[in-house]
Amino acid sequence: MAYLDDGQTRAKSKQVGALRGLVPFIRPYRGMVVLAGVALVATASVSLVLPLTVRQVVDGFGADVALLDRYFGYALVIALLMAIGSAVRHYFVTRLGERVVADIRRALFDRVMGMSPAYFEKIMTGEVLSRITTDTTLILSVIGSSVSVALRNVLTLIGGLVLLMLTSYKLSLMVLLIVPAVVVPIIVLGRRVRTSSRENQDWIAQSSGKASEALSAVQTVQAFTHEARTRADFAVVTEKSFDSARKRIMIRSVMTFIVIFLAFSGVVGVLWIGAHDVRTGTMTPGQLVQFLIYAVMVAGAVGALSEIWGELQRAAGATERLVEMLNADDPVQDRTAPRALPRPVRGQVRFEDVTFTYPTRPDAPSLKGVTLLVEPGETVALVGPSGAGKSTMFQLLLRFFDPQGGAVMLDGIDLRDLSRTDFRSAMALVPQDPVIFAASARENIRFGRPEASDAEVEEAARAAAAHEFIMDLPEGYNTFLGERGVMLSGGQKQRVAIARAILRDARVLLLDEATSALDAESERLVQAAVERLGQGRTVLVVAHRLATVKRADRIVVLDQGRVVAVGTHDSLVAEGGLYARLARLQFTDGTA
């Protein structure tokens, strides 16, 4: 499984600094960051004032009631300020997290939707979905909670240490001796947490890829009774994900144990000495209580930071993965300043000495020096055995890939010099495996031209011989067709796809086995529609069934990536070459 190797050989996160990749997404919301920061500093500062009030209460317990009431009143005011500050901080931090993650998800989706098919030859769709969902959820947890809590605890730690020093210099020095013993495990074990977190996320992505692949082909899996094997394959990947998660949890648990035990053990030792100071009169009971509260706050802050550090490690790995995707190189890219395709589009298509090899099959060229000129308004059929390069020519014409040699041109301009959106708007495709979206029949056809009216949609459906079966659906054109068009037969899906192409009304029409799943009657109707549609347009047809291409202006015969013959049906049959052999296999009289 190549995608497993790819996932495991990706560079590991070296530090939490990988979170800097989130800065471009946070920068537009500086206002929220500032407000959240002000509330954060305010609540941390107020919480550090509370022990001072407690000290006054303890030391002044024997004072008059009015003074005691005033101290408790101060405590209530402090509690109110903390509540307000915490609520404001929570609102802005959580809102910021949701906003940033929504922007990241949109940026990822926008990036992926613009990637060429060459990119998807090296990564599974399920892994892409995992990054958009699982990885961004981790980042949401960090931005919406962990970072805020971490900063609050850092402020509490620093402020607490300063006030500890002011309360008792001697005891504070003893507390500081504990800090290295706590920090070292965080650094050492934190590295292992980071590594295992990245590994865990990789396995989760692969698990998602397995599930997506199996669910999208569930009928094939069941038809071949591969349910048990598919379940077993998914279980293996899922268990590996669990094992890596278990290892990460164990490391974090050990780190948490060490940090908390050392921190609180040190506090107990320090308090033991402090208790002796109270007995000798060198320290008041209020000072000891104040020191105790600050010590607990410092120890709690250290313990919380050890927990949050692990979350930051995981988020750093997730951020790294997302930044990888956002910065991934697309093999097919538009030029910085592309040429504009002249309008109106004439529809001349030219392949000039084109050589092409798929990236995943570098030793098996799909096209070898193909040269072909299709004049505007001409209908040209591409025929030949499977693997001859017919569909590959469509892939290059739509610029899903770029040829390694030669050029593919539209109206005399190299496609690499044009914007993909520009020249693709002049083309309409009916693929061999038609894509039906989880939407109504009307919206599936309107996908060809979103601004089309209902009347235009229905007219296109009639031209594609799809109107009658659509009207027989429970809600007609408003019937929801289900995911991947599960409510339709193969032939019905193709007719919807043809209606979509007809509605697009493009200058160049590409039909890739467009009638392969139609019955004889529907094929006759669709052929008539295609012939009407093809008038004045450039039409390229890929077909195995030669009956569908007999009326083409020219037939181009391909074999093993080369053009071996060009002519009309009758002339090619008379030549007696590859086309004649294919014709004899399909037509009972050998010359039909």
Image: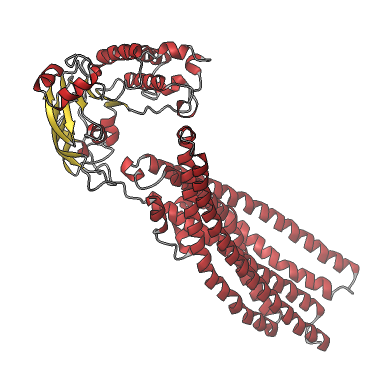
Of residue 236 and residue 213, the one placed in the foreground of this image is 236
The answer to whether one can see residue 100 in this image is no
Q: Residue at x 21, y 25 (%)?
A: 343
Q: Is residue 494 visible?
A: yes
Q: Position of residue 292 (x, y in %)?
A: 74, 75
Q: Is residue 66 toward the left or the right of residue 282 in the image? A: right
Q: Is residue 527 left or right of residue 455?
A: left
What residue is drawn where x is 32% and y is 18%? 502
Name the residue at the left extreme.
Answer: 575
Place of residue 484 in the rendered image (x, y in percent of width and height, measured from the top left): 45, 29
Residue 272 vertical position relative to residue 185 in the rendered view, above or below: below
Identify the residue at the far bottom of this view. 280
Image x and y of residue 234, in percent: 51, 47
Q: Position of residue 97 (x, y in %)?
A: 55, 50
Q: Residue at x 70, y 83 (%)?
A: 171
Q: Quadrant of residue 281?
A: bottom right
Q: Nearer the viewer, residue 61 or 478?
A: 478
Query: Left or right: where does residue 516 sit relative to residue 196?
Result: left
Judging from the image, the colouring scheme is secondary structure
Q: Is residue 138 above or below residue 435?
A: below
Between 583 and 489, the residue placed more toward the observer is 583
Above or below residue 578? Residue 102 is below
On screen, residue 263 versus residue 60, left or right, reads left
Query: Which image quarter holds the C terminus?
Result: top left
Q: How many marks?
A: 0
